[in-house]
Amino acid sequence: MDAPRSAITSPQNARIKLVQSLRDRRARDQTGLMRVEGYDEISLALASGLDLSMLFYCPALFRSPDQAGLLDTIGGTGTELIEVRRDLFERISYREGPDGWLAVCRSPVRGLDSLWLDACPFILVAEGIEKPGNLGAMLRTADAAGVTCAIAADPLADWGNPNVVRASKGAVFSVPVAQAGTPEAIAWLRSHGILIVVADPHAARPYTQERYVDPVAIVVGSENHGLSPAWTDAADAQVGIPMFGRVDSLNVATAAALLLYEALNQRLAAGRPQVGR
């Protein structure tokens, strides 16, 4: 059944107000909805099996005439298609230079008990991340490295933040994600027999000397404060990244990338299959 199509011209329309409200975390938490902006991000969300409730589009902003074909694809899913004029789309867009695509969907965030684990889980945990761009960048790397899932522990930036979606290039839909408090996350990892390896800039053991081929969670901390004592107390191993300059730490997304790819290289060498996405 084809989805209904409509056109909106008024900024006072209830649907326009809804999509604008989803810029704020409180509205996302209250409704369980989030925004997805951008042709590539929406395409990945659809390819990952996500259902869209509404799609706002503006043909005048499409980057290519071929992109219009996505409307036919989405129209067959039951998503409400809403055309808006250019000035109104630019008003509701979170981005500078929008490409004419903006959707509303249910949040993909799961509870820990809803996460699927393979035989040898490979997990990223990020505690207290403040900057959405860092959380999104880590998730993009996690997708590339084939992690089983990613957990935000006590996050200040949530997975549904528009800048997380943008920085991850839509990987928030391709990688199973969850949010939890730190004690809950530690208990869950312990209950599944998963090794906890924490990144600590003061650790004496270089990250390249740790073993990551068994079920493992790599844990990184916030930009300003690092990891809480709960994680360092729970750690099976603490690893550091050698640094020889005057700056005392790396950007958290960079640090996570180094550890994830060291783990990936070891797991591939050991014949551990990675999650296909």
Image: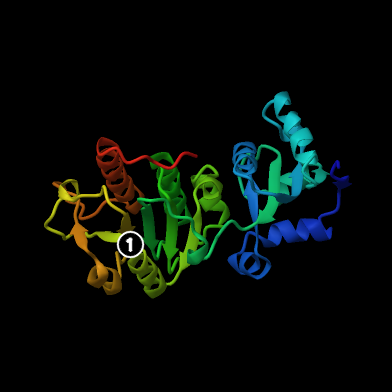
Residue 67 image position (x, y, % from top left): 70, 29
Farthest residue, direction left: 204
Residue 159 image position (x, y, % from top left): 52, 58
Above/below status of 26 relative to 132: below
Q: Quadrant of residue 117?
A: bottom left
What is the number of callouts on the image?
A: 1
Above/below status of 251 relative to 38: below
Q: Can residue 157 be seen in this view?
A: no
Q: Which residue is drawn at 75% across and 39% down?
A: 74
Q: Report the front residue among 147 and 62.
A: 147
Residue 253 appears left or right of 248: right
Farthest residue, direction front: 119
Residue at which label 1 appears:
221
User: For the residue labelled by badge 1, is the local secondary structure a helix, a strand or a loop?
Assistant: loop
Residue 210 image position (x, y, % from top left): 18, 51
| Quarter of the image where the N terminus is located | top right
Q: Report the front residue among 20 and 255.
A: 255
Q: Which residue is drawn at 82% across and 42% down?
A: 83
Q: Which residue is drawn at 25% across and 39% down?
A: 270
Q: Report the front residue among 53 and 242.
A: 53
Residue 249 appears left or right of 156: left
Residue 162 image position (x, y, % from top left): 58, 53
Q: What residue type is labelled 1?
A: Gly
